[in-house]
Structure formats: C-alpha cells, structure tokens
Amino acid sequence: MTAARHFRPTSARIMKSASHPALQNRLLALLPENETHVILPALEPVDLPRGFVIVGADAPIEHVYFICSGIGSVVTVAAETQRAEAGMFGREGFAPTSAGVGGTISVQEVLIQVEGHGFRMPLKVVTEALSTHPTFANLLARFIQAFSAQISYTALSNITCQVDERLARWLLMCHDRVDGDEIALTHDFISLMLGVRRPSVTTALHVLEGRKLIQAERGRITIRDRKGMQDFAARTYGKPEEEYRRLIGEF
Amino acid sequence: MTAARHFRPTSARIMKSASHPALQNRLLALLPENETHVILPALEPVDLPRGFVIVGADAPIEHVYFICSGIGSVVTVAAETQRAEAGMFGREGFAPTSAGVGGTISVQEVLIQVEGHGFRMPLKVVTEALSTHPTFANLLARFIQAFSAQISYTALSNITCQVDERLARWLLMCHDRVDGDEIALTHDFISLMLGVRRPSVTTALHVLEGRKLIQAERGRITIRDRKGMQDFAARTYGKPEEEYRRLIGEF
DNA sequence: GGAATATTGTCCGCCACCGTACCTAAAACC
DNA sequence: GGTTTTAGGTACGGTGGCGGACAATATTCC
C-alpha cells in the first residue's frame, strides 16, 4: 500500500478539481459553493521550490498559502542555532496559521521542504473573508486545532523518543504528503528538521534500513514497510492524523 | 515586579467582573454584551482541585472549562510511560481546545496542576454557540492559535534545552498564571510535566537556587528574580506570550 | 575527463541525563 | 509522642547523542 492511495482524490474530487485546480487543496475543496465564488478568484497560483520561505519568523504575513502538492515545514526559531520543526503540512493545510484567526504576524518560520505548487491569497482578503465566510473561518480554525495536535506529538516525541524513532515518525508524515513511496531528502536537511546532528541521522537511517523499513540512497529515501515503520515509531504516529480526520476529513 | 502585577485586573475589569464572576476569565471578559447574554447563563461554577481531570486522553468532551484561577496542564499521552506536557493555561484560556472548533473528542488529557476555580459549559451549548456567536467562535480560535504557539516552543525547548533551562521556562509560565511569587509544587509533579526523572528536577532546582533566581522549600517554590529567569531560559520564554497579546490582549 | 561540490560514512572523547536504589527530613496521622 | 507517609537529597554505572573532525563516495560543472 502506497501513500498515494491515502491521498488519491476520489472521483468526485477529481471532477471538482477539474473546475478549479486549487480545489486539490483539501481545505478549499470542502468549501460550500457560495463561499468558493469569492475565495477562488482571489487565489494566485505559485510554484513552491525547495527552500522557498512562505513567511519568516516574527515577520509580517503578506500572503496565505494553500498547498496543492509538496510539503511545508513550520519551524520554531529562538536563535540562529536554536531552531526545530514544530510540524509539517501538505495539501491538507494552509500557512501561516496565525492568518486563519485574523493575525498579521507569524510566530514561526514556514518553508518548503519538498517542492510542489499551490495557491496564495493576499492576507487582507483572508482577514475579510473570516468575518463574511463562516465556513471558511471554521475550516481554517479546525486545521489550526488539528495542526496543534500534531505539534503536541512533536513535543512528546522530542523528549520520550530516540532519534531513530523520531525519524520514523517524521518519514511517515512525509510519506503521507507525497505521491508514491520515494521522498527526496538529504541527511543534512533532516538533521535540521529534527534538531539533531547530521551523523545522528545517518546512523538512524541505517537502523531503519537494517530493519528493511526503508531504502536509503543518495538524496532519496524510499518507504518499504509502512506498517513496520508505524510500529517502530512507538505510538507517536497516528493520533494527530486521527484528529485531522475527525475534524476535517480524509487527507 | 511580581506576576500579580501582570494579571491584576484593571479597574474596568473589576467592575465588569463584579457583574459576573466568570468574566475574570480573559476570553469571556472580551465577549461583546450581546454575546454574553447567551453565554454567561449557560456557565456553571466549578472548583478545580489539584489533579482534577478536565478531560481524558482520547475521551469524549462533556464540558468546556473556562478557568478563573489556578493552572491547567495539557498533556500528550501515547502510552502509560510515554506522556509529557504540551502546554499550560490559566484564566487566559479554555479547554479542551478541540471543542472550540466543533470537536467532540479531546486528543490530549487536561488536568489541574495548581488548584483554583472556574466555570464550565456543556459541550452542546458551546458547539451551537460557535455558529450563532461569531465573536465567541473567533475568540476561541484565537486562543487555539496562541496556545499552538506555546506548544511549538515546548517542542523546541524539549530538544534544544537542558533540563534546568526548560525548568526555568516552565516556572516562568506558572508564575504568569498565579497571584504572587509562590507556587505550590513538588519535584515529583514537575518531573512528570517535564518528562524527566525526579532527581533531575532536584538538581536543576539547585542550579536555579544557586543563582538566586528562586527559593525552593518543601512543596513550594518562590520566584525571586524574574528577569534573571528569563535570561536563563535561553529565549524559549516570551514569544508565545507575545502572540497571545497580539491576538487576544493582556493576560 | 578532471576538478569542484554535495552528500554520506565513520571515529573519538565527552557529558547530560537515565534507571535504580537508598537515605534523610519534614509533615501528617493516630 | 511516636509512627507512618510524603518530599527531597545523593550516589553510581550506563548510554544516547553531542561537538568536531576527517575520509569516502556521488554529482555537477567546466
């Protein structure tokens, strides 16, 4: 079973997304027709290359991004040497979350981790829509709550788990957000996201590879045994994903 | 400067809270009059003794709690031996957050860490109010976003900081939520919240005490140098509090 | 094809924290 | 007042991950 299965749009969604490509984003896809009429025209398509900064830490928000493919990382930054990923999102979410409740400044940095494309709206349009479009506002709020659950599990795994377990959880979350079983990643980048040394990532990957859970090549990791990975991740994977499904629906 | 100063209600607030004691809660205090008319009558006063469980992990939500004094802890639970605090809240918030967007199940466990009192509403009333009372809904959503920022800093400090630095941050956050400089806490309880061994808390407290930042007695910790604590906490304290002020206002 | 660069593999000493155990002192109880 | 309970102090070996350095491959670029 590949991750693609989890995320392959249903035929109904395919038809809908044919009407507007932005509806590949799970949140936008759930908007009622009377709200899409106003939201969709305000969207501007954007390519999201790896490393693209959606918003800086403590920086004013200019646009709100709805990703259709690729992965974004939300990174907490306290100092140059003190930074770590809080959570990640793909086409099931949006960023920066603060804009979803009327905020104008982002606490965290948000950057593209796996390249893709999506759409963006000027902050002002989002802010206004929050009061005029209740379903839109509630949808964004629901995502913030689901994402908050994800972050709380990041916090948990950061103290209770060893590097290899945290890595397993992180790879599973990436897997959920890409098509297929291959993910383009370097050890160095992973080490930044997990907040560990680069060599720690190398040895942790060797552990997973030794258990036949993944296959690691230069700049690319292939998931081979998803179920085994979940067992290895020591119960830190799954609950936040459940919360998303309860509050919003399938990824 | 004591924490009490931060939280002492302004004279305007005192007058308002005289009209209804639940308005000591910062969120309820910000509701417009036309919304309080419906929200306040649905509130039931509750005592919140230490250890009281507001909601269990993965459990259905029955009531939504608005604290007026004391501190609640939001704890992520993956297994009996795998649990750690994600964040804490006092009269500036509510719990469980999931109910604030229409959820009926709480991912995390929420329990009372420092005793106090507050008010609670049946879940059903909250859920209905979300669609009929837009300011109420937005206020809860703003708190969820602010709390999410707090959790992301917990996640950061969990990997980048040593136990004594994390302890300093945690004590500062407690200090913000009690009146005065004394906090009733045992090493054992702190160790549960920080996810470390109890002896690690003892030695970390000795470090802070050696620097004259706190004074530790049996079952009680007194903050003596708030500024020094902030310096010691290595930039992991402050940003989430800023986000709260930006989105909602003073604590 | 060869040089420069990016990525990955491996080693070493170090230390913060762990698990566990045991002891002391303060408070509560009868 | 003496016993039980609860909270705090200390010790010890073990270890996961750190900081840092260096070597060995793939890729890319000229």
Image: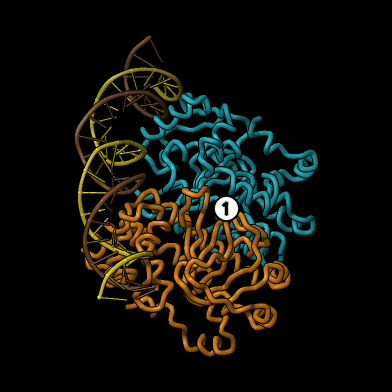
Chain colours: A cyan, B orange, C brown, D yellow
- Above or below residue B153? Residue A45 is above
Residue nearest the observer in this picture, A34 or B166: B166
Of the 4 image quadrants, the one containing the N terminus of chain A is top right
The amino acid pointed to by label 1 is Phe
Residue tagged by mark 1? A147
Q: Residue at x 53, y 74 (%)?
A: B67
* Quadrant where the C terminus of chain A is found in the figure: top right
Query: x, y (%) of residue B101?
Result: 65, 62
From the top left corner, tell me how far across and down residue B184 is, in percent. Answer: 38, 71
Q: Is residue B14 above or below residue B111?
A: below
Tell me the residue at 38%/57% (across/down).
B191
Q: Position of residue B102 (x, y in %)?
A: 68, 62
* B195 up-or-down from C14: above or below: below
Q: Nearer the viewer, residue A70 or B123?
A: B123
Q: Secondary structure at mark 1?
A: helix
- Crowding at label 1, few (<14), some or many (≥20) Cα neighbours within 10 Å? many
**Relative depth, front residue between C22 and A200:** C22
Q: Is residue A170 visible?
A: no
Q: Position of residue B104 (x, y in %)?
A: 67, 60
Against A74, residue A210 (above or below) is above
* Residue at 61% from the left image edge and 58% from the top image edge: B106
Q: Chain of mark 1?
A: A
